[in-house]
Amino acid sequence: MLQPLSQETTAPDLRQRAPTLRIVKAADLDSEAAAATAEAQWTREELIGRIAELCGNDHAGHLSLAGSLVHQFQAAGEPVAWVTTTTDTFFPPDLAGTGVDLTSLPVARLGDPVAATTVTDRLIRSGSFGLVVLELIGDHQIPAGILGRLVRLARQQEACLVCLTKRPLGSMVSLRGTIHRQQEGSDGICGVVVHKDRRRGPGYRFSYRYRAPHGVC
């Protein structure tokens, strides 16, 4: 999960975790690279009213990027909910380390993907949440009819649905990126290649630097 640059993770129970991400400050980049990075990032403003999908292998970094989005929405005063079909979801101390308020993050854990999408539908339909994260494992998919309804609800409620998947969802998704990690010693890069963006057009990419916790380097 994301790790603030100003902190180092030292707790023993974090030492066996997969590499954690840290956000690159603009000062760490030259002016041209900083401008390109700022332009390409997925932000709350970019995501409102849309369904976005982060697609990648298990633990490829999608939990960390989703955590950064949760922080963005909470910082803007938007309630957030997390729906998952797996017990192997985010590690709470990691998420808390990014500044996420766990006490204001309801989590619904449902083994049945149909039930998970039903709960997601109701959360968005309520108009009470600015962001809903739906974490699907394996080859779980959302039927086209339900996905179309979620698209309309997100637009009507000016909410965002971020789906974490292993296999791409249907064509109705407004924004889709494939996530990957590249290790470079103790530091590395978690990159997102955007294959679909109905507003900007596809083909751009952005990345975050990450640092492994002590004992993992």
Image: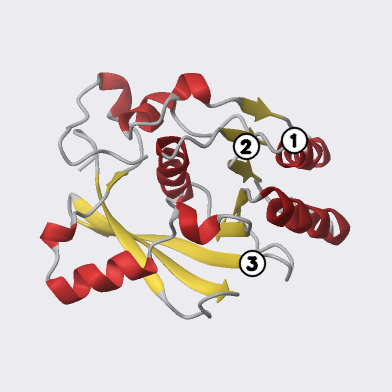
Q: Which SS class for mark 2?
A: loop
Residue at x 63%, y 56% (from the top left corner) = 49
Decide if residue 31 is on the left or right side of residue 74: left
Q: Local crowd at mark 2 within 10 Å, few (<14), some, or many (≥20)? A: some
Decide if residue 138 is on the left or right side of residue 177: right
- Amino acid type at mark 2: Phe
In the rendered image, which residue does mark 3 sit on? 174
Q: Position of residue 165 (x, y in %)?
A: 61, 53
N-term mark: 2 or 3: 2
Q: CA distance from mark 2 to mark 3?
A: 19 Å
Q: Position of residue 101 (x, y in %)?
A: 42, 25
Q: Which SS class for mark 1?
A: loop
Residue 126 badge: 1
Q: Position of residue 217 (x, y in %)?
A: 20, 43
Q: Viewer-proximal residue, 169 or 149?
A: 149
- Amino acid type at mark 3: Ser
Please say if the residues under marks 3 and 1 sit with CB atoms less than 8 Å apart: no
Q: CA distance from mark 3 to mark 1?
A: 21 Å
Residue 129 badge: 2
Q: Position of residue 144 (x, y in %)?
A: 84, 61
**Above or below, 213 relative to 173:** above
Mark 3 or 1: the one toward you: 1
Please say if the residues under marks 2 and 1 sit with CB atoms less than 8 Å apart: yes
Decide if residue 68 is on the left or right side of residue 140: left
Q: CA distance from mark 2 to mark 1?
A: 8 Å
N-term mark: 3 or 1: 1
- Amino acid type at mark 1: Ser
Q: Viewer-proximal residue, 25 or 21?
A: 25
Residue 183 sits in which quadrant? bottom left
